[in-house]
Image (cartoon, rainbow, N blue to C red):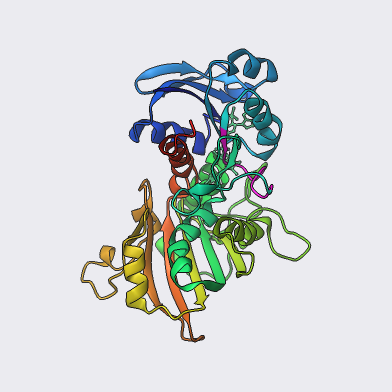
Amino acid sequence: MTFNIAVVGATGAVGQEMLRMLEVRNFPVKKIYPFASSRSKGKKILFKNQEYEVIELTKENVKKYSKDIQLALFSAGASVSKEYAPIFAEDGIFVVDNSSAWRMEPEIPLVVPEVNPHTLAKDKKIIANPNCSTIQMVVVLAPIHKVAKIKRIIVSTYQSTSGAGGKAMLELYEESKAVLSKLSEESLISKDNSNFLVEKKQPSVFPVQIGFNLIPQIDIFLQNLYTKEEMKMVNETKKILEDESIKISAQCVRVPVFRAHSESVWIETEKKVSVQQAKEILASAKGVKVLDDPFNQDASLRYPTPIEATSKQITYVGRIREDLSCENGLVMWIVSDNLLKGAALNAVEILEELLYRKII
Ligand SMILES: NC(=O)c1ccc[n+]([C@@H]2O[C@H](COP(=O)([O-])OP(=O)(O)OC[C@H]3O[C@@H](n4cnc5c(N)ncnc54)[C@H](OP(=O)(O)O)[C@@H]3O)[C@@H](O)[C@H]2O)c1
């Protein structure tokens, strides 16, 4: 059995990785239908050595091709998903949507295949892919939750620029280049910040300079003074773990890294879990690799880093230790490629799960 698959947002950072994941994981694809905006109409996309022309996403074009399509992967933003996912679904197409448009709708499954694949069903045509920072956290925490019930989570994220799309990566590149071109060894220490500051080009993705800086804001601020990204981590984690009682608080920070998000996570559990037990639980957890050997001579084996995690189809966890501030607490460091497990890989794994469960 092979499938015709629409990739909506095929020219974007996530869309490109979706195509690569379909290819490297050998998903049974017969033909792809790459959709994007009018800006990309007619551009050429290569998939399995075959050239495809980008189709402009319009209602007419969807209707024209939908009879021939069985599956769709969406990564073109929430407003596009809100408008177009139901049009695909009405024609019987399973849609895996990467945006935030449908995630918190009660009847829409929000799926991480290692955690809650049982929520997939034949009549649930729209399936939401969780937020990137949520996916990598729950893939590690779910097996611990199962054994010891997590009562509380505190998380600080260190999120890469690719999480905000291709243009955001370019902004980091250009600003870093501009800073480096005006710096010299002698000017590293100066009386003010002028040597590190560059003029912000407009329009820009980030509100302030990202090159050699940190931004404690991802997405917009809400009335409760948290950002939308922080509240996504809170609400989506409860929905995926099917436990509204977990107390969660998040602080999300954009860092000058191109790919892979990192997270410092503190958890408090009902039952005591020792460091050794946590390592054993995680060593056998699907999709997770424990990289935790602090005294290793080789620093690359001591803990995971974003560069190490880039392009890897796995979520790394390290720095596992007891929380000194509470009785049943653990601290850990979780790193994963946001474009892969945080987006494209998770989406393709959902398709694989649909196939495995004979839903398609
Ligand atoms: N980056 C991540 O780590 C990540 C993780 C999880 C989820 N997501 C979500 O995935 C989506 C895409 O993210 P990205 O990082 O790939 O962004 P991106 O690099 O900016 O790409 C956006 C894609 O959407 C297309 N698009 C934009 N407006 C469109 C429209 N009106 N009609 C049709 N296509 C349109 C673009 O086409 P053109 O090339 O024609 O403009 C492009 O293919 C967002 O919803 C984002 O929240 C991203």
Front residue of this view, candidates 142 and 234: 142
Looking at the rendered image, the quarter that the N terminus falls into is top left
Magenta residue span: 95-105
Measured from the top left, where is residue 3 in percent x and y? 45, 23
193 displayed left or right of 278: right
Please state the quadrant of the image where ligand 1 appears.
top right
Outermost residue toward the top?
64
Identified at 45% across, 77% down, the residue is 330
Outermost residue toward the right?
223
Residue 330, placed above or below residue 337? below
Identified at 57% across, 18% down, the residue is 55
Front residue of this view, candidates 198 and 78: 78
130 displayed left or right of 300: right
Outermost residue toward the left?
297
Q: Is residue 228 visible?
A: yes
Front residue of this view, candidates 299 and 293: 293
4 displayed left or right of 94: left
Is residue 103 magenta-colored? yes
Identified at 71% across, 31% down, the residue is 83
Residue 177, placed above or below residue 157? above
Is residue 161 magenta-colored? no
Identified at 63% across, 60% down, the residue is 230
Residue 210: quadrant of the picture: bottom right
Q: Is residue 212 visible?
A: no
Measured from the top left, where is residue 125 in percent x and y? 60, 34
Magenta stretch: helix, strand or loop mostly? loop
Measured from the top left, where is residue 41 in percent x and y? 58, 18
Measured from the top left, where is residue 320 in percent x and y? 38, 73
